[in-house]
Amino acid sequence: MILDCAGKALDLTHPQVMGILNVTPDSFSDGGQFLAQDSALAQAKQMVADGAGIIDVGGESTRPGAAIVSVDEEISRVVPVIEAIHSEIDIPISIDTSKPEVIRAAIAAGAGLINDVRALTVDGAISAAVDCDVPVCLMHAQGSPQTMQDDPRYDDVVSNVIEFLLERVSVCEQAGISRDKVILDPGFGFGKRATHNLQLMKHLAKIIALELPVLVGVSRKSMIGKLLNVSVEERLAASLSLAALSVWQGAKIIRSHDVRETVQAIMMCDHVMKVQDIG
Ligand code: 7PM
């Protein structure tokens, strides 16, 4: 299956890595806007060289307790970067946002997929997605990024996530977004304790069984820090292990900070999964 992301192809006949490109001000050292854009473009080119299938551009930090970013600020961060990458790079760009105005501006600038951690629940986001006519990734979260990690509770996290995702798919379909444009994401770390994340990973196949492409974002996440007591710089091996477990169960897209290593890990999974059986 090949997803058309506004004219650029995302080939999901193989698992793909979505490279994370943050354009929040804390993600580059000094202020200069042009420096920041140059650095973003250089990072994007490196990700392509490392085998990324798509680049995820985000201008809003969803970190618990992070400052809320205005629409204009978010647009002025992401649009110049998307324009620069779009003209120089052939792989699709996704826009990591929940705001309808940012969705419209990013798609107009050349992005080809909407990656929304709020699953198009913000007022106007569904119509923006319908008008833009690009694929969307719908992610589950419990609560808002500001407070979601305070005391997350579920009686059955896997069923709860599935129920939410199916409801959002149905809302999208009723609004005119066809099913074949929808990607699902259980939202690791978004309003979930370590045990909830582990249960979701153990039973990811139940989400794969919904028969829509599944995206997994576990790269360097705090669940790894909590379980293994390692700092954010020391989470690569565990991130790769979780990427492999995801692809083994059928996940099609792995969102990662470490593109080269993640491509190698999931290519090995793909080889194992596709090798011809004996006899
Ligand atoms: C602080 C908290 C900083 C969380 C960054 C994050 C996902 C995503 C993010 C995901 C999809 C991170 C997250 N995570 N989009 N955006 N799936 N679809 O760790 O899991 O990168 S932001």
Image (tube, grey):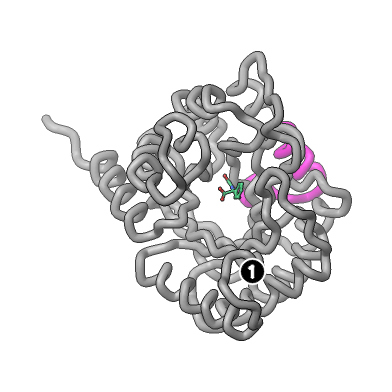
Q: Main secondary structure of the magenta part?
A: helix
Whether 16 is drawn above or below 149: the answer is below
For disc 1, the neighbor class at 10 Å (few under 14, some 14 to 19, many from 20) is many
Residue visible at 63% across and 49% down in the picture: 137
Q: Is mark 1 within 8 Å of ligand 1?
A: no
Reply yes or no: does residue 177 show up in magenta.
yes
Establish if 123 lies above or below 208: below
The image shows residue 21 at horizontal and vertical percentages of 55, 64
Q: Residue at x 50, y 65 (%)?
A: 9
Q: Work out whether residue 114 or residue 25 is closer to the camera in this orientation and state it.
A: 25
User: In the image, what residue occupies the spot 62% across and 85% down?
Assistant: 34
Q: Quick check: can you spot residue 5?
A: no
User: Based on the displayed image, in which of its 4 quarters is residue 40 positioned?
Assistant: bottom right
The magenta region covers 166-181
Between 131 and 65, the residue placed more toward the observer is: 65
Tell me which corner region of the image, top left, top right, bottom left or bottom right, holds residue 151: top right
Secondary structure of the residue carrying numbered label 1: loop
Q: Position of residue 86 (x, y in %)?
A: 58, 77
Q: Position of residue 206 (x, y in %)?
A: 51, 26
Left or right: where 152 falls relative to 249: right
Q: In this view of the protein, can residue 168 be seen by the observer?
A: yes
> Residue tagged by mark 1?
111
Residue lying farthest to the top in this orientation: 155
Q: Position of residue 169 (x, y in %)?
A: 70, 39
Position of 33 with respect to 262 (left or right) is: right
Q: Which residue type does callout 1 highlight? A: Ala
Indicate left or right for 221 with 175 as reference. left
Residue extending farthest bottom = 34
The answer to whether 277 is drawn above or below residue 100 in the figure is above
* Residue 92 is inside the magenta segment: no
